[in-house]
Image (cartoon, grey):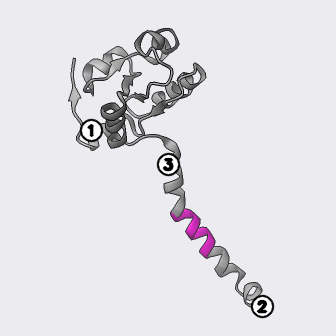
Amino acid sequence: MKFLSDNWYLILVALTSGGLLVWPLIKESKAGLTAAMAVQLINRERGVLIDVSNPDEFAAAHAKGAKNIPLPELEAKLAAVVKKKDTPIIFICPMGKRSATATATAKKMGYTAAQNLTGGLKSWRDANMPIQKA
């Protein structure tokens, strides 16, 4: 007990540094999918890749095979594109922020397997996945 009271600051530093080392792993696991995980969902479970970018952004560059539903139109058009509520849906946008919003919206609509591609189109490109231009 004396050791703990005499060295409380060392224990605090050790716990803090350990927490800072583990934090990125925890944050990444909650953030969404990697590009490789998304491709596995698409190939193995017939997942649908939906790009929620604006039409001009989508035309400039998008993940190959992605369907474009701009974020403001998501609630109106998602049911026509994805009929089954348990179908895996991977949302993507240029940086990953709008797709995170789209994932939350889809879950509120009852799509249980909706997920966000972490890092958006940038992470897709970084993983050397195919890109298309309209």
Query: What is the spatial separation of the Cα atoms under label 2 and label 1, in whole angstroms?
Result: 55 Å
Q: Quadrant of the image for the C terminus?
A: top left
Which residue type does callout 2 highlight? Answer: Lys
Pointer 2 local density, CA inside 10 Å: few below 14, some 14–19, many at least 20 = few
Magenta region, residue range: 14-21
Q: Secondary structure at mark 1?
A: helix
Please tell me which of labels 2 and 1 falls first in the chain.
Answer: 2
Q: Main secondary structure of the magenta part?
A: helix
Q: Which residue was labeled with disc 3?
A: 29
Which residue type does callout 3 highlight? Answer: Ser
Please tell me which of labels 1 and 3 falls first in the chain.
Answer: 3
Left or right, 90 with respect to 104, comes to left
In front: label 1 or label 3: 3
Residue at image position (41%, 21%) is 52
Q: Secondary structure at mark 2?
A: helix
Q: Quadrant of residue 69?
A: top left
- Residue 62 counted in the magenta span: no
Residue at image position (49%, 55%) is 25
* Label 2 with label 1: CB-CB less than 8 Å: no
Q: In the image shown, does 85 or 18 lie closer to the viewer?
A: 85
Residue 125 - label: 1
